[in-house]
C-alpha cells in the first residue's frame, strides 16, 4: 500500500499537483484542511506536512497510530510536541534555510521603510494628503549597521545591503568574522548599540536572548538610530521598546515579530507613530513557499522511498 500523505496547512499549488501525480503516494486531494478534517484523517495518515496552523500534540498522536513522519514546512518546530513524537517513534523534520533569503530581505525592507517613512507617507496619501515636509527621511548609504546575530540570515542581510556602502559590525559570540570587506566583528554588545545607526536583530529566541534587548541597551542607541526585528518576538522587551519609542529617544523601529502572536488587538505598540509593523511576514514570499514545498516533497520521497531521513529535528 502506498503511504497516505496529508498536507494540512496549505502548499505551493504546482508542487502539490506534482506530489499528487506521483505514483509513490496516496495524497489527500486538498492541500489545506481544517483541524476537524485533520483529526478525522489522522488514523489513516502515514506522512503529514504542516506549517504553523496545525499543532501536533499528544492528543493528535494518540489518534494517529500509523503516523511515521511529520514535516514542518518551514523552520520553527515549536508547534510540534517533539518529545511525544520521539516517544511513539514519529520522526520530525523541518525545511531549514528555505526562508532565509526572504527573511533577510524583509529586514532590509523594514529598514528602508523606516528610514524613508514610506509606510506613513502612504497612509496619508490614501487619505488625500500631500505632506512632503513631514516625511523627510534618511539614507541607508554609508550608515553604520549593527547586526545582532550573524548566522545565516544576519549574513545574508550583510550581503544584501552591501550595495549601500554601509559599515557593518556584528555581535555574535559564536561567529568568527566575515569575508566581506565592510563587515567587522564587535565583541561588545553595548558598543554595537551605541555606535550603530541601524540595529537589526537576527538571533534565535532562547534563554540567552529572551529580553536581551532591554531598556539598558535601547537607552544606549543614538537619537537618530532605528531598530529592526524580523527574528523572533521576545528578544526585545516590548515594554521597554514602547517607552523608548513613545519618548522619541530613538528615531523609529520596524518589527515583524512580537512576544505574543498574533499581536493583541489593543497592544500599545499599535499606537506608536514611529513603529512600522508587519504581521510576521518574513517568510511570506512565493519564492520561499516554493522552496519550502520543494524541500518537503523531496524529504517525503527520501523518507518513504529511500528510507533516508533528512533534516531531522529532535528535542
Ligand atoms: N520573520 C520571519 O518570518 C523569520 C523567518 C525565518 C527565520 N526567522 C528568525 O530569524 C532568526 C535568525 O535565523 P537564522 O536562520 O539566521 O539562525 P542561525 O542559527 O543561522 O543564526 C543565529 C545566530 O545567532 C547567534 N547567536 C546565538 N546567541 C546569540 C547571542 N546571545 N548574541 C548574539 N548572537 C547570538 C548564533 O551564533 C548564530 O550565528 C531566528 O530567530 C529565526 O527564528 C524569522
Image: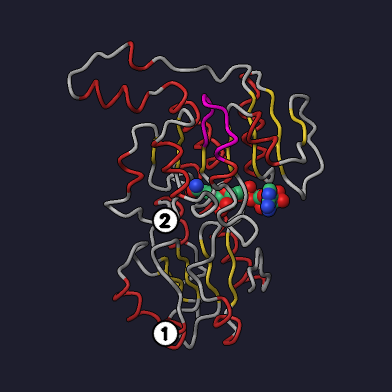
Residue 196 numbered mark, or none = none
At a point 43% along the width and 71% down the height, the residue shown is 55
Does the stretch in magenta take in 7? no
Residue 200: where, in percent of width, then height? 58, 37
At a point 59% along the width and 86% down the height, the residue shown is 87
Q: Is residue 24 left or right of residue 303?
A: left
Q: Is residue 185 above or below residue 161?
A: below
Number of numbered discs on residues: 2
Task: Give the camera-side residue of 232 and 281.
Answer: 232
The picture quadrant where one finds residue 146 is: top right
The picture quadrant where one finds residue 260 is: bottom left
Q: Is residue 242 left or right of residue 314?
A: left
Q: Is residue 137 above or below residue 238?
A: above
Residue 311: where, in percent of width, then height? 65, 63
Which quarter of the image is occupied by the C terminus?
Answer: bottom right
Residue 59 numbered mark, or none = 1
Q: Which residues are magenta?
A: 218-227
Amino acid at each position: 500500500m502506498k503511504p497516505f500523505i496529508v498536507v494540512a496547512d496549505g502548499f505551493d499549488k504546482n508542487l502539490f499537483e506534482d506530489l499528487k501525480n506521483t505514483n509513490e503516494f496516496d495524497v489527500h486531494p486538498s492541500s489545506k484542511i481544517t483541524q476537524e478534517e485533520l483529526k478525522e484523517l489522522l488514523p489513516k495518515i502515514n506522512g503529514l506536512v504542516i506549517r504553523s496552523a496545525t499543532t501536533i500534540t499528544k492528543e493528535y498522536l494518540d489518534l494517529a497510530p500509523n503516523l511515521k513522519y511529520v514535516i514542518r514546512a518551514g523552520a520553527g518546530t515549536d508547534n510540534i510536541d517533539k518529545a511525544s513524537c520521539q516517544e511513539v517513534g514519529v520522526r520530525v523534520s523541518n525545511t531549514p534555510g528555505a526562508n532565509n533569503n526572504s527573511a533577510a530581505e524583509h529586514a532590509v525592507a523594514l529598514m528602508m521603510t523606516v528610514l524613508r517613512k514610506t509606510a506613513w507617507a502612504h497612509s496619508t496619501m490614501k487619505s488625500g494628503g500631500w505632506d512632503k515636509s513631514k516625511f523627510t527621511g534618511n539614507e541607508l548609504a554609508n550608515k553604520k549597521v549593527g547586526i545582532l546575530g550573524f548566522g545565516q540570515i544576519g549574513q545574508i542581510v550583510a550581503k544584501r545591503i552591501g550595495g549601500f556602502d554601509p559599515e557593518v559590525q556584528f555581535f555574535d559570540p559564536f561567529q568568527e568574522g566575515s569575508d566581506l570587506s565592510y563587515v567587522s566583528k564587535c565583541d561588545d554588545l553595548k558598543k554595537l548599540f551605541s555606535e550603530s545607526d541601524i540595529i537589526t536583530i537576527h538571533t534565535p529566541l532562547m534563554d540567552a536572548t529572551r529580553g536581551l534587548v532591554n531598556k539598558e541597551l535601547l537607552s544606549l542607541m543614538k537619537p537618530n538610530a532605528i531598530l529592526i526585528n524580523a527574528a523572533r518576538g521576545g528578544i526585545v522587551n516590548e515594554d521597554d521598546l514602547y517607552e523608548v519609542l513613545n519618548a522619541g529617544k530613538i528615531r523609529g523601529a520596524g518589527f515583524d515579530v512580537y512576544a505574543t502572536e498574533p499581536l493583541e488587538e489593543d497592544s500599545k505598540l499599535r499606537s506608536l507613530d514611529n513603529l512600522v509593523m508587519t504581521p510576521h511576514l518574513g517568510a511570506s514570499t512565493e519564492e520561499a513557499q516554493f522552496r519550502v514545498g520543494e524541500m518537503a516533497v523531496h524529504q517525503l520521497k527520501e523518507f518513504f522511498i529511500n528510507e533516508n531521513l533528512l533534516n531531522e529535528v529532535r528535542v
